[in-house]
Image: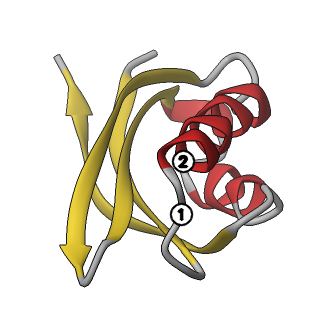
Amino acid sequence: MGEVIGLIRVMPGEVLEDSQLEKMIEDIKAVIKPPAKVGNIQIKPVAFGLKGLNVTVLVPDDAGGLDPIADEILKVKNVDSAEVTDVGRAL
């Protein structure tokens, strides 16, 4: 059984304060359940004060992919979109 590593781009619906962004990160970590694992979450400036998140997730091949995880992230407060932008095999 191999593992897949993926990048999910998460965007809030509005400009958030740093404390709101940190709360959103903690909430995202909470909705990603085993066997999936959160690798790294990076804050990326987009434009005009808007910041997005790049969420790296590691999942087993047979866990159903990354789309169900993106769907769960969409349920987090202040999340407007969660899109799988990159997928590859973990070595």
Counting residues from the start of the chain, the first of labels 1 and 2 encountered is: 1
Residue 12 vs residue 51: left or right?
right
Q: Which residue is mark 1?
A: 16
The C terminus is located in which quarter?
top left
Asked whether the residues under the numbered discs 1 and 2 touch, taking CB atoms below 8 Å apart as contact, a structural biologist would say: yes
Q: Residue at x 78, y 55 (%)?
A: 76
- The kind of secondary structure element at disc 2 is helix
Question: Outermost residue, left direction?
Answer: 91
Q: Amino acid at mark 2?
A: Leu
Question: Residue 51: x and y, percent?
Answer: 35, 64
Q: Residue at x 48, y 45 (%)?
A: 18
Q: Which numbered tag is attached to residue 51?
A: none
Question: Residue 43: x and y, percent?
Answer: 30, 46
Identify the colour scheme used: secondary structure
Number of marks: 2
Q: Which residue is mark 2?
A: 21
Residue 70 vs residue 87: left or right?
right
Question: Height in image: 58 above or below 9?
Answer: above
Q: Nearer the viewer, residue 22 or 33?
A: 22
Question: Residue 60: x and y, percent?
Answer: 52, 24
- The kind of secondary structure element at disc 1 is loop
Q: Amino acid at mark 1?
A: Leu
